[in-house]
Image: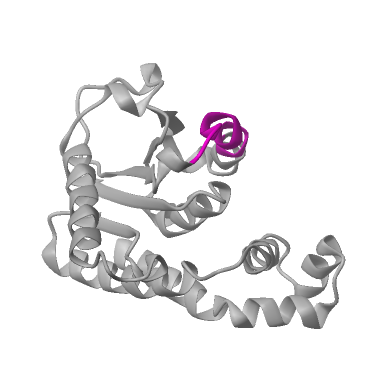
Amino acid sequence: MDKYAVITADIIGSRKHTNITEKLNPNLKLLNKNFNSALLTEFELFRGDEIQAICNNLLYLPKIIRHVRYYCRPFKLRIGIGIGPIENFEYKSITSSWSMNGIAFHLARDSMDVLDKLRTKNKNAYRREQPSTYIITKNQSFDLSVNTIYMLIDAIVNNWKDTQWEAVMLYELYGTYEMAADHLGISYSALHQRCISANWNVIREAEKNMVKLMQ
């Protein structure tokens, strides 16, 4: 049976923000364009503060999750992922994930519930210390491994400044510090230092290891 990743996210503290739709929709279009081949349905905004898509290539999932967070800045997200089958659809007629159902959707909702409980349990912790990503697959050993990795990734990425985000993402795009630095109009050493301070090499290796787990 085919397995899909239902990616559901909501904006933390959405009531404090205005014009969310106007700010997010252009970035979601870019996100969808970048991962067109790995998405069964595109990322869409629903009810003003919820975002959802279905990934049909699990090997892209770690990278997609990071890009979701990047493209949704400055908003902070909680991201719940359910991996499993989906039901009652015909591939050619798919337009939106919000009208679909299946085990993967239930697991994604369960993931969001876990994040809610963790935030309640750790309500006195600083916001950036809170976990913001959780995955459920019904494979307990896999879930334990991947969520331990994400707990550590979140502890790093939640502290990234905009300058670090831009440095990391441009270095990933261009493949060299020189080209990324030229794009930003800064020196090679400045961009290199931003990637080091973001612990990019650690995050990159963690994502590679998650891809191996997905395989």
Depth order, front residue of 162/89: 162
Res 207 quadrant in image: bottom left
Q: Which residues are magenta?
A: 17-28
The residue at 42%/59% (across/down) is 62
Res 195 quadrant in image: bottom right
Q: Which residue extends farthest top?
A: 93
The residue at 42%/41% (across/down) is 14
In the rendered image, the quadrant that contains the N terminus is top left
Task: Give yes or no for residue 48 being in the magenta stretch.
Answer: no
- Above or below, comparing residue 51 to residue 156 in the picture: above
Q: Residue 53 location, x and y as percent? A: 39, 37
Q: Is residue 181 left or right of residue 29?
A: right
Q: Residue 23 location, x and y as percent? A: 60, 36
In the rendered image, the quadrant that contains the C terminus is bottom left
Task: Give yes or no for residue 24 being in the magenta stretch.
Answer: yes
Q: Is residue 29 visible?
A: yes
Q: Is residue 215 visible?
A: no
Depth order, front residue of 177/166: 166
